Image: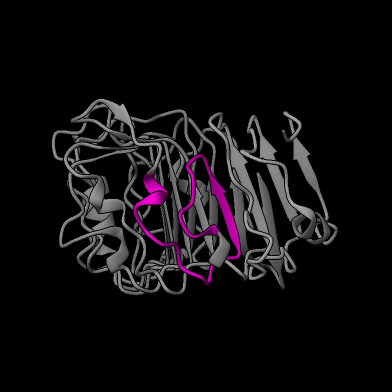
Amino acid sequence: MNPSSDDGVVDELEIVANLESECFMNLSELRYLDVQAKMLPSDFTDYLPNLRWLRWKSGNSECLPKFCVENMVILELLTPVKDDWGGLRHLVKMVSKLKVLKLVGKFLIEYPDFPRSRSLEILYLQDFGLRLSHKDLDIGNLRNLKELHLLYCEVGVIRGGTIGMVKGLQELNITNLRFERSLRAVLIGDLKFLEILRVDVITDVGLRSVYENLLLDTKLPRSLKELETTSPVANLVELVELEKLMVRYFEYGFEIPPADSSDMRWRLSKSKSLTLEETKLTTPPNTSCRRSLLNVASIVTDHPPH
């Protein structure tokens, strides 16, 4: 147990133990609770009324205790919890001030609903798909969302349209994402404020194939500063604000612009990092491209360009 206090008031607590409810009786001003315990009381509502940040990584994934969630801003459930007791759905619905939600959904049967979570700015969902009976994801009400992370998830449809309808997104991470019905739900050309994009293998479950040319179907926003991809990019030459580019596991030949020496728009002048991991280049960089690469801080490649 590692308390942090100021003038005798504990505002931060990390728990690595098995505790009884009496341990929390004098912690009414506690703001941050980091739980790594196997056994905890089933009800915290009378003990932690001012809790703002809950980080839960417990050995007991059967249920989540009841918390006072009126003032909660950050909720991290990093251990898979089961949904048969209904506590998680109630918790998410009641949190009206929530700004950050991180959730591992390995044992859940459906995605959370966000009717009162319009203040949500960061949504991180991982491992949804193994037991999902309802795979539709509703993010249409999350108008203030700045970051969306979907890792190892399976999605039926995005209710109301596409990921691109969340206009204010600044960071999007879609890693090993599986779509059951339509890959059009990934279209991101309308995200005019997007600065960070990470795209790993995307699978069309219906076709049972890997959709390797995802980014060839849409022009990426010119606002991008960081791009990590396993797919070719249609308009890479137009991403003049790009500072960091990582191309991973692309064996068929990735083209680093400008392919035409007369096209001088993309000189990597703002680039700080270029990483080519298990990736082959289609053609050697031309003279102007070589000069622009002098501005790159780091180049990492497992295969020499050829």
Q: Is residue 165 magenta?
A: no
Kindly identify the residue that appears in the image at 43 percent across and 35 percent down. Answer: 201
Q: On the rendered structure, is 243 left or right of 150?
A: right
Name the quadrant of the C terminus.
Answer: top right
Q: On the rendered structure, is 7 left or right of 249?
A: right
Query: Horizontal and vertical percent for residue 2?
Result: 68, 48
Q: Is residue 219 magenta?
A: yes
Task: Reply above or below: 10 against 42.
Answer: below
Q: What secondary structure do most residues of the magenta stretch adopt?
A: loop
- Residue 208 figure quarter: top left
Task: Reply above or below: 297 against 71.
Answer: above
Q: On the rendered structure, is 244 left or right of 101?
A: right
Numbered-mark total: 0
Query: Horizontal and vertical percent for residue 269?
Result: 75, 68
Kindly identify the residue that appears in the image at 56 percent across and 66 percent down. Answer: 239
Query: Horizontal and vertical percent for residue 92?
Result: 28, 57
Q: Which one is in front, 56 or 253?
A: 253
How was this image coloured?
one colour
- Residue 1 figure quarter: top right
Give the extent of the magenta segment. Answer: 214-236
Q: Which one is in front, 274 or 21?
A: 274
Kindly identify the residue that appears in the image at 67 percent across and 57 percent down. Answer: 244
Task: Reply above or below: 170 against 305.
Answer: below
Query: Horizontal and vertical percent for residue 250?
Result: 55, 33
